[in-house]
Amino acid sequence: MRRHSCFVFLFYGIFLPGILSFPQTNTSIDCDSLLPNYEAEPQTSAPPYIIAVSFDNFEPGNEIQVTLEALRDVGFKGFNLQAREIDGDIPVGTFKITDPNTKGLECHNMTNSAVSHANSDVKQKVTTTWIAPHDVREIQFIATVVQNLENFWVGIQSKTLTPMHSESLNGTAKSKRKIMIEVECNKRGGTYTTQGRCIMV
C-alpha cells in the first residue's frame, strides 16, 4: 500500500504541474476568430498589453516594426498577432520572424501571415517585422494575448496605419479631372485659369 501511495504522489508531483501549466505545443489560437483552442471566456476588462508600431504610414514593401508589450509586470505566455484591413477579417501582408520567442503561422494558405508564440515562457515583450503588401487600405494590427489558461484578451488593436499611395491616388484622380475640365473649357473657346475657372473670351 505504501508503494502505491508513493507512486501516486510521484505521478502527481511529476505530471500534474505540466497538465495545469500552459501547454507548449498544443495550445493554438484560431486564425479567424482569434480564440484559443480550449473552452474559456475572454476577459472583458481593459487589456494590460499594447501593440506599438514604428510608422503611421506605409508603402508596398515597407517594413514596419511591431511590438507587443505588457504595460505592467503581467507577462504573457501565448499570443496571435495579425495585420487586418479596417473592418476586415483576414490577415494581410507577411511577417519577418526576428524574435526567438515567436514563430510564423500560415493563415489562409499564406506563409507567415500571422505571428504566434514559439514557447510557453513568460514574455514581457516580443518584436516582429511586418512587410506591407500591395493594394490594401488602412490597416490595424490585432492580437489575442494569453496570460494564462484562465486569463486572455481578444481583439487588442494598434493605432491605424494608412497607405501612402492612397493620397497619391487621390491626387492623380484630381489631376485627371482638372485636365478634363480644361479640355472642355478650351473646346468652348474659353481659357482655363490657374484658379480653376473657365473664362470665356
Image (cartoon, helix red, strand yellow):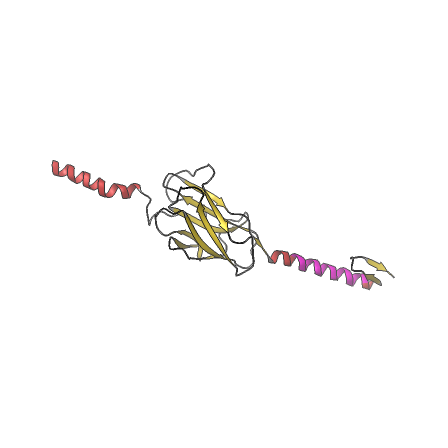
* 134 lies left or right of 149: right
The answer to whether 191 is drawn above or below residue 11 in the figure is below
In the image, which residues are magenta? 170-185
Where in the figure is residue 126, as x and y percent of width and height? Answer: 42, 51
Q: Main secondary structure of the magenta part?
A: helix
Q: Nearer the viewer, residue 94 or 52?
A: 52
Q: In terms of image quadrants, where is residue 195?
A: bottom right
* Quarter in which the N terminus is drawn: top left
Q: Is residue 3 magenta?
A: no
Whole-percent x and y of residue 5?
15, 36
* Residue at (78, 61) in percent of width and height: 182
Residue 55 vertical position relative to residue 17 in the rendered view, above or below: below
Percent position of residue 162, x then y: 58, 53
Q: Is residue 169 something one can see in this rendering?
A: yes
Please check the rendered image and state whether residue 171 is part of the magenta-colored stretch, yes or no. Answer: yes
Q: Nearer the viewer, residue 65 or 113?
A: 65
Residue 134 spot, x, y in % from top left = 55, 59
- Say left or right for 24 vs 62: left
Front-lying residue, 80 or 100: 100
Q: Can residue 30 be seen at all in this image of the molecule? A: no
Locate residue 60: give its quadrant.
Answer: bottom right
Q: How many marks?
A: 0
Q: Quadrant of the C terminus?
A: bottom right
- The residue at the far front in this view is 73
Residue at point 61% right, 56% down?
166
